[in-house]
Amino acid sequence: MMLSPLAQIDEHQLTALWNAAIGDRFPMRPALLRRNLFGDLNFLPEASFAACDDDGRLVGFIGAKLNREFSGALSPRQGYINSLIVHPDHRRQGIGTALFHAAVDVLSQHTPVRIHIGRDTFHFFPGVPEEIPEAAPFFAAMGVAIATNRETDLVAALADYDLPAEVKATIEREPVAIRPCRPDEVSLLADHLRRDFPGRWQYEFAKFIYDGGDPADYMIVREGDRVIGFCHMYTPESVWTGPSTYWSPLYPRDRFGGYGPLGVTREARGRGLGLAVTAAAVLELKRRGITRAGVDWTGLVDFYGRLGFTPWKRYLSAALELNANGR
């Protein structure tokens, strides 16, 4: 087995290997792999490796990241394993172990406080997927702490969806406008995210707009001259493939969309606006022809259940804690 820089491998080869390994549960496309791995400014090429057998055939790879780009909020340096894939015919041969140690050795030189499994910017997974039963035992053997709390993806068919009665009551009661963001409201939404949700959500919005994203893919709650809530929506026309739609090929007969994250300023909570902006986003997706929608990376299963969403995929939070010397 030989390790080489991951960036030297064609994305179509990597996609084929991914799909041979886990494509029945997490189907990959070259454009998605390119955007979420090589296209992320936090991708760390020197810590990302491909494994080839003695005949030069690709049998495994690992992608690693480091939070190098400023996200809008100061935070300790973190490392990430974005993905670790080994071909089914080459497992239990030490390939995954060699890839993991090679990536961690390089990441550790940058002295992050921990290395997360997933959870990176432009992540594929918010943790270790439960649908890959061998993954958690493998990472545990590598010294990774596996948490008991679960993150969940949810899904719902939208054919019969309508605003719940409680949401209609909220919209009638509250002196707010809930609608897709207009171009002239981008600065107001940016102010809201910078003020109320500094960090990843603010960062993702700035990147989204920079990449040419349509402001109308954000449902907003506007009160007076301020935006006080938001919900990000994704359709097949969105500039990015959103995390709530990563695995949409599992529903080939549906026009699949998704939404998330969402948030309401702290001072406005308790008024039903969080559920209202979320419900309005789902109705807007239906209006745009979406027949099935997903929600990604949440622990609020009951909250989304009020809108008809049911659990789809689950993940275990996992991280390798590092000492001051990096290991």
Image: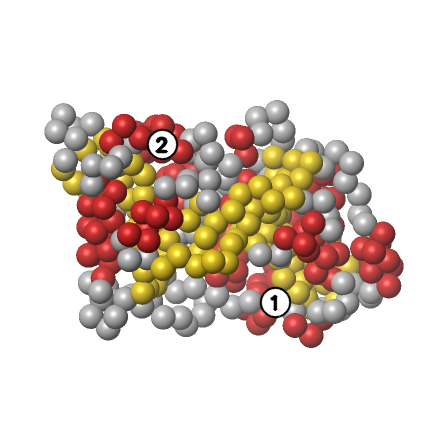
The image's mark for residue 21 is: 2
Q: Quadrant of the N terminus?
A: top left
Mark 2 element type: helix
Could you say which quadrant of the image residue 160 lies in?
Answer: top right
Q: Nearer the viewer, residue 141 or 263?
A: 141
Foreground: disc 2 or disc 1: 2
* Residue 11 picture location, percent across and down: 32, 33
Say which residue appears at 63% left-offset and 53% top-offset. 301
Q: Quadrant of the C terminus?
A: bottom left
Q: Are marks 2 and 1 in contact (CB under 8 Å)?
A: no
Mark 1: which amino acid? His
Lateral position of residue 195 relative to residue 140, left or right: right
The image's mark for residue 192 is: 1
Say which residue appears at 22% left-offset and 66% top-offset. 326
Mark 2: which amino acid? Ala
* Residue 109 picture location, percent across and down: 20, 63
Label 1 crowd bin: few (<14), some (14–19), many (20+), radius 10 Å: many
Lateral position of residue 157 relative to residue 238, left or right: right
Say which residue appears at 45% left-offset and 53% top-offset. 316
Q: CA distance from mark 2 to mark 1?
A: 42 Å
Mark 1 element type: helix
